[in-house]
Image (cartoon, rainbow, N blue to C red):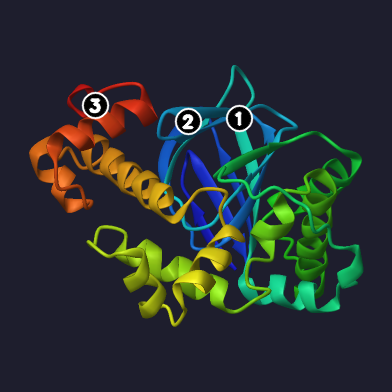
Amino acid sequence: MNVQQDDKLKTLGYSGIFLSCYSDYSEKCIHATPEHVLVYLYSGEQVIEDRNKKIKLQAGDCAFIRRDHRLKMYKNSKGEDLYKGISLTFKRSVLRDFYRKMTKSEIPTAVKISDNTVFKLAQSPAIESLFQSLTPYFDSNIKPTEAVINLKLLEGIYALLNSNEELYPILFDFAEPWKIDLLDFLNSNYAEELSMGQIASFTGRSLATFKRDFKKISSLTPQKWLIKKRLEMAYIKLQEENKKVQDVYMEVGFKNPSHFSTAFKKQYGISPTEI
């Protein structure tokens, strides 16, 4: 268990379950977890900012955050209500074990691949029951056992699958081992000037296999996925790192500043110089 505490903040961490409480306090943080996270708000307010999109959570709201994405989070008290939230982190090992035990015929096959980073979930008895059962652990003198932690993570996976079918291919994108390798390669090499044939070769595929495999992880074409990724990284470098436009466009893989500016404005509604 990890515990951090001062006059304004208390955070408890138990092997995948994290509880946070702020008193009369507003906290801004950068979220960049390598694992999927399910966030639930007991009280106060939480704002999740994904580039030009804002998702606001109030008491009783729950959101799923996809892994390997960089977001801003604002955790605020609201009136007399302190910020009090909890998150479940789903490690790949837990999800793989869950997938192995599933009845494969019950897995939906015609599910649209979503490119969303954050999914705000509808309130449901399963989600409400799961998180209300964790409230006793805000008392730092009570520690959940490993068995309880594992049970709560399993409950969380069931709640996610029952709330939105689009989460099936996201949670279980390791069902075929190449998927993780493919995304790892693209996330690490998005700025490189590589042809689709080169990417296919570097990831151990023919071009036809690469294109077929890519359709299973994104509704975008590989070219559009790369442009979207480059623009997202440019947004971060401009807004959070205060870099200049003339430096950023080449860093993220654009060769032409005019093309970069046009694509940026199309995606975010403002020019890069306005950030």
**Residue 232, relative to residue 59: is it above or below?**
below
In-front residue for pair 259/131:
259
Q: Position of residue 239 (x, y in %)?
A: 25, 35
Q: In the visual, does 48 lie left or right of 18?
A: left
Residue 159's mark? none
Q: Can residue 189 be seen in this view?
A: yes
The residue that label 3 is drawn on is 275
Residue furthest to the bottom in view is 204
**Residue at 81% over, 74% down:** 147
Q: How many labels does the image show?
A: 3
Q: Looking at the image, tell me whether mark 2 or mark 1 is earlier in sequence order.
A: 2
**Residue 98, relative to residue 41: is it above or below?**
below
- Crowd rating for badge 2 (residues with CA inside 10 Å; few <14, some 14–19, many 20+): some
- How far, Cα to Cα, is label 3 from label 2? 27 Å
**Residue at 59% over, 17% down:** 79
Amino acid type, mark 2: Tyr
Callout in the foreground (3, 2): 3
**Residue at 24% over, 24% down:** 271
Quadrant of the frame with the C terminus: top left
Q: Position of residue 118 (x, y in %)?
A: 58, 41
Q: Is mark 1 on a helix, strand or loop?
A: loop
Q: Looking at the image, tell me whether mark 3 or mark 2 is earlier in sequence order.
A: 2
Callout in the foreground (1, 3): 3
Are circles 3 and 2 on residues that touch, CB within 8 Å?
Answer: no
**Residue 183, relative to residue 265: is it above or below?**
below
Residue 82's mark? 1
**Residue 32, relative to residue 49: is it above or below?**
below
- How far, Cα to Cα, is label 1 from label 3? 32 Å
The residue that label 2 is drawn on is 25
Q: Where is residue 252 in the image (x, y as percent from the top left)?
A: 23, 51
- Crowd rating for badge 3 (residues with CA inside 10 Å; few <14, some 14–19, many 20+): few
